[in-house]
Amino acid sequence: MNAHLHLRQDQVYPFDARGIAKRFRHAAIFGALDALNSGERMRFVNDHDPLPLLDQLRTRYADAVEIQYLQRDPGEIVIDFIRS
């Protein structure tokens, strides 16, 4: 069994939203962000720019989660969410 121990603060956890049913996406994203420890990041991949989601994240987490775009091409969006 491989337990997730959060041993490194600089750990990057992938999250590909394209494989999650739309009605579950936001809840899954919030759950994943809630599970991050300070300094950890979730690398989010999606097929569109999730502007409404980003507004919700800013409201819910304020400065507790930093948003960094890594790629912003049509059909391929990659964002790092970093827990502070």
Image: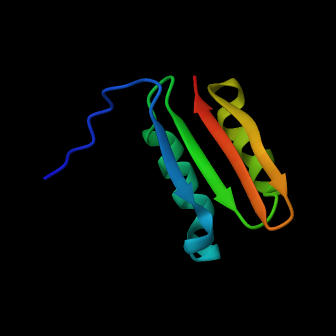
Q: Is residue 60 above or below residue 75?
A: above
User: In this figure, what is the number of numbered marks?
Assistant: 0
Q: Is residue 27 left or right of residue 59?
A: left
Q: Nearer the viewer, residue 6 or 52?
A: 6
Above or below, comparing residue 84 to residue 67 in the picture: above
**Image quadrant assignment for residue 8:** top left
Q: Position of residue 77 (x, y in %)?
A: 76, 56
Q: Which quarter of the image is occupied by the C terminus?
A: top right
Which residue corresponds to the image point at 55% horizontal and 42% vertical from the top-left? 42
* Residue farthest along the left direction in this orientation: 1
Nearest to the observer: residue 20 or residue 14: 14
Is 15 located above or below residue 67 in the figure? below
Q: Quadrant of residue 52?
A: bottom right
In the rendered view, how is the structure colored? rainbow
Q: Give me the residue at 51% from left, 51% from top.
A: 14
Q: Residue at the spot x=57%, y=54% of the render?
A: 29
Residue 12, given in percent of the width and then of the height, sits at: 49, 38
Residue 82: name its quadrant.
Answer: top right
Question: Which residue is at the front of the view, 64 or 49?
Answer: 49
Residue 57 lies, in percent from the top left, at 70, 43
Left or right: 12 as drawn, with respect to 26: left
At x 48% / y 23%, what residue is drawn? 38
